[in-house]
Amino acid sequence: MDHIEKITTDELQAKLEAGEQLDLIDVREDDEVAEGMIPGAIHIRMGTIPDHLDHFDKDKEYIFICRSGNRSGHVCHYLHEQGYKVRNMVGGMMNWNGEKVF
C-alpha cells in the first residue's frame, strides 16, 4: 500500500490558527456534515469524488477529512494513485476539538 501523508487534528488546527491557506475536503455524508465542518472545508461526498476530479489541481495539496479518518484514507489512496498530492486527517472529526461551522 502506498504511503499516504497524514496530519493530526492538532497539527491541522495549529496550521489554521497560524493563518495557513489549506485546501480541506470533507468527504462525509450530508447528515454528518450537518453536525459541523472545519471552517473553510469544502464538502464533496466520498462516493462522488471520481465525478469531481476536475475540482482538483495536481499542483496543490489537499487534506481530506471524514468522521474517523477511514473513508478519507480510502479517498487519499484513490487520488494518490491518480497523481494528486493528498494528506489524510487521522482521527477525523471525532478527534477535532477546534471550531466548527454549521
Image (cartoon, rainbow, N blue to C red):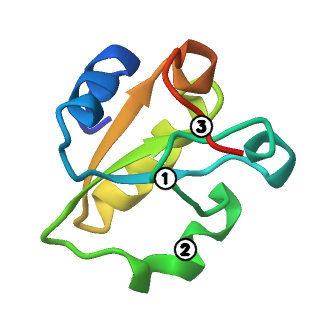
> Helix, strand or loop at disc 3?
loop
**Disc 2 to disc 1: CB gap under 8 Å:** no
Residue at coordinates 73% horizontally, 45% vertically from top-left?
Answer: 33
Q: Is residue 52 left or right of residue 34?
A: left
Residue at coordinates 63% horizontally, 42% vertically from top-left?
Answer: 101
Q: Amino acid at mark 2?
A: Pro
Mark 2, residue position: 50
Residue 54: x %, y % from top left: 41, 86
> Helix, strand or loop at disc 1?
loop
**Where's the C terminus, which quadrant?**
top right
How far apart marks 3 and 1 lie (CA) works out to 11 Å
Q: Residue furthest right?
A: 31
Residue 64: x %, y % from top left: 44, 45
Q: Is residue 7 visible?
A: no
Residue at coordinates 81% horizontally, 54% vertically from top-left?
Answer: 30
How far apart marks 3 and 2 lie (CA) works out to 17 Å
Mark 1, residue position: 41
Residue 80: x %, y % from top left: 29, 55
> Helix, strand or loop at disc 2?
helix
Residue at coordinates 55% horizontally, 74% vertically from top-left?
Answer: 50
Q: Is residue 25 left or right of residue 56?
A: right
**Where's the N terminus, which quadrant?**
top left
Q: Which of 20/83 is in front?
A: 20
Mark 3, residue position: 66
Q: Is residue 34 left or right of residue 45?
A: right
Q: Between disc 3 and disc 2, whose residue precedes? A: 2
Q: Amino acid at mark 3?
A: Cys
- Within 10 Å of the Cα at label 1, are there few (<14), some (14-19), or many (20+) other Cα atoms? some
